Amino acid sequence: MEKTKSKSSNSTNGKASSSNKNNGNVGISKSAKRVSPSDQSTLMEEFFVDSLKDIYWAEKHLLKALPRLEKAATTQELKDSFVQHLEVTRGQITRLEQAFEIMGKKAQAKKCDAMDGLTKEAEGIIEDTEAGSMTRDVALIMAAQKVEHYEIASYGGLKQLAKTLGKTDLSDLMDQTLQEEKMADEMLTSIAENKINLEAASE
Ligand SMILES: [Fe+2]
Ligand SMILES: [Fe+2]
């Protein structure tokens, strides 16, 4: 190793000319400025934890919103799906708490403006549609699917981020929730397609 080093600097060797010295310095400062892989993962980990806080708030907020949607729904089928998703949401919150634990952080919620807006929109729909109508259910399904799609985007991102961080256990946890959100979305689609859309069209 030594040999190669002295060989390569041989031509300008010895009494380190000032230009030679500079070259060395440039090399050093360049690598010092570059963010090291460990710093990089720290920034990403911070972003990951921040995203966890966002979705943690969102899921907890949904615990309050889902019973209101259930109460407002017309058909038993849609009511049941909201009740079922409420239970699933509780499990997802526990899973998020496990994710915080894996990251060595305290579970903490940070207001998610997107979820706040989506649930406000759902409440607006309840006000704007007639109780007991099928149109109410069509509108509620649309509102609920917007929520699911937001969650699918969030968990999809978290899953990928966890993978990039090399945390397979975390990535698997996020994937479990991602699959549940996808299933909820599909279930809402099938409820709409099976009968609600048709019946609403004849109202
Ligand atoms: Fe969820
Ligand atoms: Fe969901």
Image (cartoon, rainbow, N blue to C red):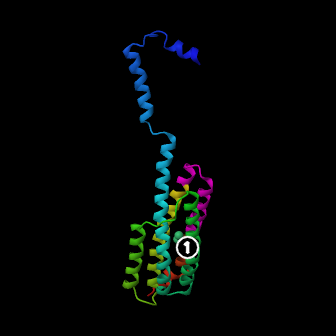
Say if the magenta span includes residue 162.
yes
**Disc 1 within 8 angstroms of ligand 1 (CB):** yes
Q: Quadrant of residue 12?
A: top left
Which is more toward the observer, 171 or 45?
A: 45
How many labels sit on residues? 1
Please report the bounds of the magenta region as a residue range.
160-182
Give percent across and percent down for residue 181.
Answer: 55, 68
Q: Residues within 10 Å of mark 1 (few under 14, many from 20)?
A: many
The overriding secondary structure of the stretch rendered in magenta is helix
Query: Which residue is outermost to the bottom?
Result: 132
Give percent across and percent down for residue 5.
Answer: 53, 17
Q: In this orientation, does residue 201 appear?
A: no
Which is more toward the observer, 19 or 61?
A: 19
Give percent across and percent down for residue 176.
Answer: 61, 64
Helix, strand or loop status at disc 1: helix
Give the quadrant of the C terminus: bottom left
Give percent across and percent down for residue 171.
Answer: 59, 56
Residue 28 higher or lower than 131, as above or below = above
Q: Quadrant of residue 34?
A: top left
Residue 92 higher or lower than 70, as above or below = above
Query: Which residue is outermost to the front?
Result: 15
Residue type at tag 1: Thr
Residue under pointer 1: 89
Q: In this orientation, does residue 86 appear?
A: yes
Residue at image point 41% right, 24% down: 25
Give the quadrant of the N terminus: top right
Residue at image point 49% right, 67% down: 56
Say if the magenta span includes residue 174.
yes
Which is more toward the observer, 164 or 150?
A: 164
Residue at image point 57% right, 74% down: 90
